[in-house]
Amino acid sequence: MLNILWLIIAGLFFYYWWNSWKYKGRAMGLALDHCRQLDLQLLDQSMVIRGIWPERNANDSLVLRRTYQFEFTSTGEQRYQGQIVLTGMELKSVDFEAYRLPGSD
């Protein structure tokens, strides 16, 4: 019986890990799109999860809200922080740290 419990726990862990890649990829794509629209460069293609919380979506269903942090640059000289929030697979917000505009010395 204990072996079945460990198998279920391992299966749930694997499912969470596998599913997390899907959400991280979605966040990366959305951040890249927003950076391109603002003529910014997403750095290192890295996306770091900063938090997971349960939340109700627009359909009143319980989903997870995931917050990811990324780095970008506007001039190629300095790194700035950005944050993207997903509610389920839907984009909730994208925030950029204040950054220097190219040619504004």
Image (cartoon, rainbow, N blue to C red):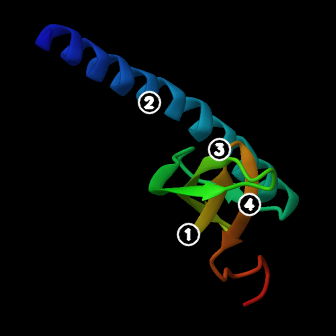
Q: Front-most of 98 and 52?
A: 52
> Residue sitting at 25 percent across and 12 percent down?
7
Compared with 53, 47 (above or below) is: above
Q: Is residue 64 visible?
A: yes
Q: Is residue 74 visible?
A: no
Marks 4 and 3, how far apart at CA:
14 Å
Q: Amino acid at mark 3?
A: Met
Say which of marks 2 and 1 sits in front. 2
Dot 1: what SS? strand
- Can you give x and y, in whole percent of width and height, for residue 95 in the image? 68, 71
> In the image, residue 44 lies at what x, y percent?
53, 47
Residue that numbered label 3 is attached to: 28
**Crowding at mark 4 (Cα within 10 Å: few <14, some 14-19, many 20+):** some
> Which comes sooner in the sequence, label 1 or label 4?
1
Q: Amino acid at mark 2?
A: Tyr
Decide which of 99, 65 is in the foreground and name it. Answer: 65
The reply to whether the C-beta atoms of the residues labelled 2 and 4 are less than 8 Å apart is no
